[in-house]
Image (cartoon, coloured by chain):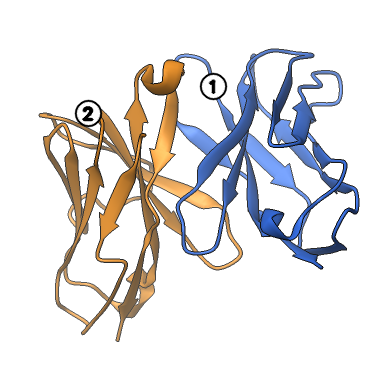
């Protein structure tokens, strides 16, 4: 079946540090891949997405590249801010379906 | 744009009672809404897909008679947890699928409802 595995948290960084949150997936065919972010007290928001191999999604300084050969979609940011503190979810969606399959989420805390 | 609300944000009830959770798309119409359940330190698990004007489609292992879903309008879906028991305590999240809102197909999520059954 389809599944998403992301690194367990929590992750604690200092402001301006480099961030990587690993995400790998198992799926048949060619899924679309997503990163969602959940700020405290709010609903999940789409952060970025990629729909085919080698696509790079980017938003708010975050980037992730769809790597079919390694079935990965790692999230990166060069310099994190305190306001980036949130829970980050990696997810996939199979073509022809609107159903999302989520990873367990990674909590990020950025200290000033 | 594309805001989804849930009500209530948290609820505490006695075992054996029923609880209704509302999910509303505030500024767009959603033909499809999804209901998820999230346990602590676990991923979101899809419970059911709710389509306006038709019966919900439940995921394998989800009890249809326990979790009643109604999608009576293009902006409202409700989840009723019937005869709730402590094991139903969880965080319930809804999302609304927006076709081409903001130029992209995507799901917009509500903030979630924390249910505690005593």
Q: For the N terminus of chain B, give its image quadrant.
A: top left
Q: Is residue A107 left or right of residue B56?
A: right
Residue nearest the observer in this picture, B45 or B75: B75
Q: Is residue B81 left or right of residue B106?
A: left
**Chain letter of disc 1 in the image:** A
Q: CA distance from mark 2 to mark 1?
A: 23 Å
Residue at (86% x, 19% y) in the render: A69
- Which SS class for mark 2? loop
Q: Tags 2 and 1 in contact by the CB under 8 Å rule?
A: no
Image x and y of residue A28, in percent = 64, 20
Question: Label for residue B92?
Answer: none
Residue corresponding to mark 1: A94
Residue A86 drawn above or below residue B77: below
Q: Residues within 10 Å of mark 1 (few under 14, many from 20)?
A: some
Residue nearest the observer in this picture, A29 or B22: B22
Question: Label for residue B29?
Answer: 2
Q: Is residue B27 visible?
A: yes
Q: Which chain is the one coloured orange?
A: B
Residue at (17% x, 65% y) in the render: B82
Quarter where residue A32 is shown: top right
Residue at (25% x, 35% y) in the render: B27
Quarter where residue B2 is shown: top left
Q: Is residue A23 left or right of residue B63?
A: right
Image x and y of residue B47, in percent = 36, 47
Residue nearest the observer in this picture, A112 or A69: A112
């Amino acid at each position: 079946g389809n599944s998403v595995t992301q690194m367990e948290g929590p992750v604690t960084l200092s402001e301006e540090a480099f961030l990587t949150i690993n995400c790998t997936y198992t799926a048949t065919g060619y899924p679309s891949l997503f990163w969602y972010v959940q700020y405290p007290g709010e609903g999940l928001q789409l952060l970025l997405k990629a729909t085919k191999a080698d696509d790079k999604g980017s938003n708010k300084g975050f980037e992730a590249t769809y790597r079919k050969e390694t079935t990965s979609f790692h999230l990166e940011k060069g310099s994190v801010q305190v306001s980036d503190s949130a829970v980050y979810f990696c997810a996939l969606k199979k073509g022809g379906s609107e159903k999302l399959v989520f990873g367990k989420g990674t909590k990020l805390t950025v200290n000033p | 744009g594309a805001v989804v609300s849930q009500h209530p944000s948290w609820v505490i009830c006695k075992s054996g009672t029923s609880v209704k959770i509302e999910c509303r798309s505030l500024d767009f119409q959603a033909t499809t809404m999804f209901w998820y359940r999230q346990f602590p330190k676990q991923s979101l698990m899809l419970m059911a897909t709710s389509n306006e004007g038709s019966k919900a489609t439940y995921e394998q292992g989800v009890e249809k008679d326990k979790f009643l879903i109604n999608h009576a309008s293009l902006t409202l879906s409700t989840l009723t947890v019937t005869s709730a028991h402590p094991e139903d305590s969880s965080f319930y999240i809804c999302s609304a699928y927006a076709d081409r809102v903001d130029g992209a197909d995507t799901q917009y999520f509500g903030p979630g409802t924390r249910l505690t059954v005593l």
